[in-house]
């Protein structure tokens, strides 16, 4: 027994050592495997995350580049309708890029109507996903979120569109649960609002709202540029029309005045030539009448030349030009014109504005001379408040029905009233005509002397 036990006792420790070694190897191998496996997975996750980050960065770069291109295009565009379309496209691109909700976004530009009497009606300038009926909607912007945004000049979110007294009129917004309204405003000028709406109540994040505010600011700049360009184009067309009307007026005046006088002189000279052989006394008397007619014709021509380019206006100013015009009216047509000008108004008015005012007064006086049958015509220029001037041309003639004349004015051959209104607009003024049949006519032009006064007149306050 002792001989057998001895080898077994020697073997057992070796077996135990082998088993322990194997177990340790298995345990170590398993840990190493898991370590290696987890390391590989971590690296793959990092690579995937890096690829995702690169994709996001690439997408953001492309989005920013695209936004920059659209903003550059918008601010460089001088076509008004194109500016509105780009503003909506830019907002839509910002809000829905990489988002499956692209087709559910509703947007519109609502602008104040330039032709509305009170200047407070909002009309759809451009829209996305609006129905044809929505495009015809006109809003007073007097209540609800639109009134608040326009009044405060701050953007606002509407979470209950169906309860808003004005937004609920848009059919396209009935499926939306949130709307974001941004004012298109700079200083005292309010052009309208940008409207974005979506069915998801949490669609507009803070980052998106911040971006939309930047777009709204750029849109205002672009709208200003487009409107200024449009105003310049209209101004150019008006100037061309005024020049054309001036040429027509000169043609009419020459035809009605000097041309007929010269024709009469020629006929009378022919009569004198024949009378010289028969009745010398009568011929001499006729020569005297011809001489008077020739002098009157000369005066008419000089008066026309004066009105075409009154040099005294350039050298001595508006007051001297109006007084010279009154003298020529009295001398040429025996028309009594009385001028009363406050020198304080003249000193506060630039020369270009004085020129326009002179032509308004000259046109009004000439119309009164031709049609009013007035014994007196008064031309007054005086202060009206602190920063306004009032030009008034009044006569004691036969007067007329202003409404009836306005209704048929396009059919008339003369456009004197149109010329006066357009010239008043050149100085940001407002022209008013008052007349009663049998009691004379008064034409008043309110002229701003400062930018603040021009803004008040533009707003009608």
Image (cartoon, rainbow, N blue to C red):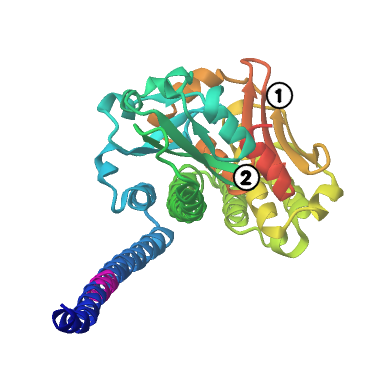
Front position in the image: 3 or 21: 3
Q: Is residue 84 above or below residue 12?
A: above
Q: Quadrant of residue 393?
A: top right
Could you say where residue 460 lies in the image, as x and y percent from the top left?
64, 32
Could you say where residue 457 lies in the image, as x and y percent from the top left?
66, 37
Determine if the magenta segment contains residue 78. Answer: no
Front position in the image: 383 or 37: 37
Q: Does residue 339 appear in the picture of this structure? A: no
Residue that mark 1 sits on: 396
Mark 1: few, some, or many residues within 10 Å (few <14, many ≥20)? some
| Residue that appears at 35% across and 29% down | 176
Magenta residue span: 27-39
Q: Quadrant of residue 102?
A: top left
Name the mark on residue 452: none
Residue that mark 2 sits on: 428
* Helix, strand or loop under label 1: loop
* Helix, strand or loop under label 2: loop
Front position in the image: 374 or 147: 147
Front position in the image: 222 or 104: 104
Q: Does residue 144 appear in the picture of this structure? A: yes
Q: Characterize the magenta stretch by its predominant secondary structure.
A: helix
Could you say where residue 362 lies in the image, as x and y percent from the top left?
64, 44
Horizontal relation, residue 323 to residue 162: left or right: right
Determine if the magenta segment contains residue 38. Answer: yes
Mark closer to the chain start, 2 or 1 = 1
Do the residues under discs 2 and 1 have CB atoms within 8 angstroms?
no
């Amino acid at each position: 027994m002792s001989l057998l036990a001895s080898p077994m006792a020697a073997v057992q420790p070796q077996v135990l050592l082998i088993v322990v070694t194997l177990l340790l190897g298995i345990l170590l191998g398993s840990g190493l495997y898991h370590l290696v496996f987890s390391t590989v997975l971590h690296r793959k996750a990092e690579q995937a995350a890096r690829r995702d980050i690169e994709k996001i960065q690439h997408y953001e770069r492309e989005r920013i580049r695209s936004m920059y291109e659209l903003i550059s295009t918008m601010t460089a565009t001088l076509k008004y309708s194109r500016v509105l379309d780009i503003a909506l496209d830019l907002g839509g691109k910002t809000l829905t890029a990489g988002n499956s909700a692209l087709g559910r976004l509703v947007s519109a530009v609502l602008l104040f109507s330039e032709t509305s009497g009170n200047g407070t009606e909002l009309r759809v300038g451009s829209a996305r996903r609006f129905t044809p009926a929505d495009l015809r909607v006109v809003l007073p912007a007097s209540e609800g979120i639109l009134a608040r945004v326009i009044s405060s000049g701050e953007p606002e979110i509407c979470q209950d569109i169906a309860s808003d007294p004005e937004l609920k009129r848009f059919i396209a917004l009935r499926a939306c649960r949130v709307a974001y309204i941004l004012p298109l405003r700079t200083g005292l000028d309010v052009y309208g609002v940008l409207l974005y709406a979506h069915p998801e109540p949490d669609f507009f994040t803070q980052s998106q709202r911040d971006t939309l505010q930047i777009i709204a600011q750029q849109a205002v700049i672009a709208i200003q540029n487009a409107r200024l360009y449009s105003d310049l184009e209209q101004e150019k067309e008006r100037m061309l029309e005024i020049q054309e009307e001036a040429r027509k007026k000169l043609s009419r005046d020459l035809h009605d005045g000097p041309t007929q006088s010269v024709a009469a002189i020629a006929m009378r000279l022919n009569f004198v030539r024949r009378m010289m052989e028969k009745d010398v006394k009568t011929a001499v008397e006729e020569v005297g009448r011809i001489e008077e007619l020739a002098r009157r014709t000369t005066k008419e021509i000089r008066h026309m030349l004066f009105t075409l380019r009154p040099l005294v206006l350039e050298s001595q100013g508006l007051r001297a030009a109006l007084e010279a015009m009154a003298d020529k009216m009295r001398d040429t047509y025996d028309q009594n014109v009385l001028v009363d000008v406050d020198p304080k108004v003249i000193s506060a008015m630039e020369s270009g504005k004085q020129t326009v005012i002179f032509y308004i007064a000259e046109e009004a006086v000439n119309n009164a001379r031709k049609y009013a049958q007035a014994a007196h015509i008064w031309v007054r220029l005086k202060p009206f408040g602190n920063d306004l001037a009032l030009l008034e041309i009044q006569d004691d003639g036969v007067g007329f029905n202003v409404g009836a004349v306005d209704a048929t004015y396009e059919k008339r051959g003369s456009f004197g009233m149109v010329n006066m209104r357009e010239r008043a607009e050149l100085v940001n003024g407002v022209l008013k005509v008052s007349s009663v049949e049998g009691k004379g006519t008064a034409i008043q032009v309110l002229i701003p002397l400062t930018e603040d006064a021009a803004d008040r007149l533009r707003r009608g306050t």
